[in-house]
Amino acid sequence: MTPTRNTIAKALATDLDRAFPHLVTLYQRELFSGIRTMVPSHSDAEDTMQDVFLKAYQSLTGWGTERRASLSVRPWLWMIATNTCRNRARTKGRRPTEVELLIGVQDPTESQPEPNLELDEWADRLAALTMPARTAVVLRHVVGLRIDEIAEIVKRPEGTVKADIHRGLKKLRTMLEEVSL
């Protein structure tokens, strides 16, 4: 039986090598969409996603079956993804300048869609946010994680995450109001 999001942790505990490809299949689209909003290009998103799954596998191989069975897979993968995006930006010596807001889920193997002016405008707006605000807004409103999950991922208190989301949304609203004037 193919593991689902509800049973993947147990499957990873039972047989890591057999279950891990299912984990990739279950989460690759969601991760790619979210990662794409945090890195400068499509190819960076693909590279980052590969790094995320490699780090996840390497981590899981060192864990016992009980720890794998009790894993909250989605927040754990997002913690790895967020940290990997942050580290890539830091090691490149620059802050990401281009961000693409993907509405819905995009298959990373699909060909690039035609340029979308609205997505480009959102990319510019998101790029104007601070990294903590952008990360919190994306994880909350694009990925759909709960506040407590985001706090665990970014290693910040829940109140700080809420403030980051509030500030990010406030700045986005201000930018939208300026455009409509």
Image (cartoon, helix red, strand yellow):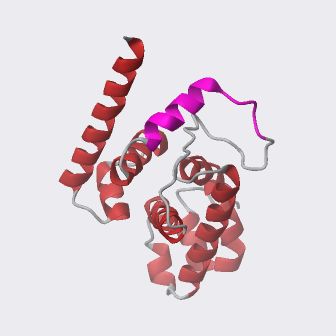
- Residue placed at 51% from the left, 62% from the top? 85
- As drawn, the residue found furthest toward the left would be 159
How many numbered discs sit on the rendered protein?
Answer: 0
Based on the displayed image, in which of its 4 quarters is residue 26 positioned?
bottom right
Residue 121 shown in magenta: yes
Query: Main SS type for the magenta part?
Result: helix
Q: Residue 160: x percent and y percent?
A: 21, 53
Viewer-nearest residue: 123 or 181: 181
Is residue 174 shown to the viewer in this render?
yes
- As drawn, the residue found furthest toward the right would be 111
Q: Quadrant of the N terminus?
A: bottom right
Based on the displayed image, in which of its 4 quarters is residue 47 positioned?
bottom right
Based on the displayed image, in which of its 4 quarters is residue 111 positioned?
top right
Left/right of residue 165 with respect to residue 114 in the rendered view? left
Classify 176 as above or below 39.
above
- As drawn, the residue found furthest toward the top would be 181
Q: Quadrant of the C terminus?
A: top left
Q: Residue 128: x percent and y percent?
A: 41, 41
- Residue placed at 71% from the left, 67% from the top? 21
Is residue 23 shown to the viewer in this render?
no
Residue 49 shown in magenta: no
Viewer-nearest residue: 9 or 159: 159
Q: Residue 58: x percent and y percent?
A: 59, 82
Left/right of residue 44 with respect to residue 140 in the rendered view? right
- Residue placed at 75% from the left, 34% from the top? 113
Viewer-nearest residue: 52 or 44: 44
**Which segment did they paint magenta?**
112-127
Q: Residue 148: x percent and y percent?
A: 29, 55
Classify 149 as above or below 15.
above
